[in-house]
Amino acid sequence: MPQRHSKNNNDLAYFTYDEKKKLGYGTQKERLGKDSIKPFDACSLCLKPFIDPMCCHKGHVFCRECILECFLAQKKDIQRRLAAHASQKQQDKDEVEEKLMLQKARELDEFDQQNHGALPRYSDKSHNQDKNGFHGANSVKATSFEEEALRTMKAFWLPSATPGASVRVEAPETHTVCPEGKEKLKLKNLFSIRFTEDNSEEGEVKITSSSSSSYDKSYICPSCKVTLTNTMSLVALSSCGHVFCKKCGEKFMPVDKVCLVCDKPCKDRNLVALKKGGTGFAEHDDHLEAKEYKHLGSGSGLGLVRPVKT
């Protein structure tokens, strides 16, 4: 039987949705699954099970080594930007002084030629010779219209009309920021958190600071003994660092004003909600759609490349 040519690709005068998707052109969207979501017990920088975790007041959790290295890199970048900005300011100052010196030298030269020359010379503030002045036998004086056209002409192929590509360095911010939330963050604002490790097979519950990380570790709420997962909302106490499920934290902490594990006094402002990746289900999480715009030609071979989360 003959083939149905109307179902073949490139048969129509326009691109169909399926043809654009195969070509890899336009904005590609994809719903992220569980494998693309960070678990609650992973560092926000290295994406590995955290070691000696530290948390900011926005609920972002980092390994101690990762956040210290991040702060050190930010400090070095700030020092580099400050040095570049100071160098640029000094360069601008030198250019202004050089222009003043050239202007004074030009004025002295014109004064000397005015007093010792055979013919008088007239000049204005823009250092251009007057129309009534002497321009030489072979010189060609352009009209004002031609001068304006030459000054505003966008001829990038002419060296005299090439725009300057000077890069200005703005004054940088001198404070460090959270690598996840992008808000101001200092080292003294971080606090250590402690998860309760599930050792039910040994018949005991152990409080650990995750000094030795492992992929098969599981943590529980020390109050209700429920295993912590990404489906649960977690809270941490900034006073002592213990982590509870949100239900226990909002039910007992504001009433008792003490930690349920160590009996250390706490207040409502000490409850910090931890950020978690999510589960991947549409009814549970938001903003889990990855978008990527591609402007590719035919035969690039990148039509089936999956977008990454932005």
Image: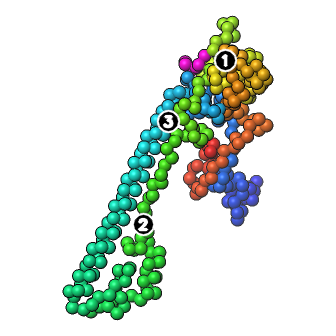
Label 3, label 1: how far apart the Cα atoms are: 30 Å
Figure quadrant of residue 77: top left
Q: Which residue is located at x 32 percent, y 91 percent?
A: 133
**What span is colored magenta in the figure?**
208-213
Left/right of residue 209 with respect to residue 14 in the rendered view: left
Tell me if residue 105 is in the magenta stretch.
Answer: no
Task: Please say if 292 is above or below 180.
Answer: below
The image shows residue 38 at horizontal and vertical percentages of: 64, 32
Question: Are discs 3 and 1 less than 8 Å apart at CB?
Answer: no
Quarter of the C terminus within the rendering? top right
Q: Which residue bears the numbered disc 3?
A: 71
Q: Nearer the viewer, mark 2 or mark 1?
A: 1
Q: Which residue is located at x 29 percent, y 91 percent?
A: 134
Label 2, label 3: how far apart the Cα atoms are: 36 Å
Q: Which residue bears the numbered disc 2?
A: 164
Left/right of residue 87 with respect to residue 154 in the rendered view: left
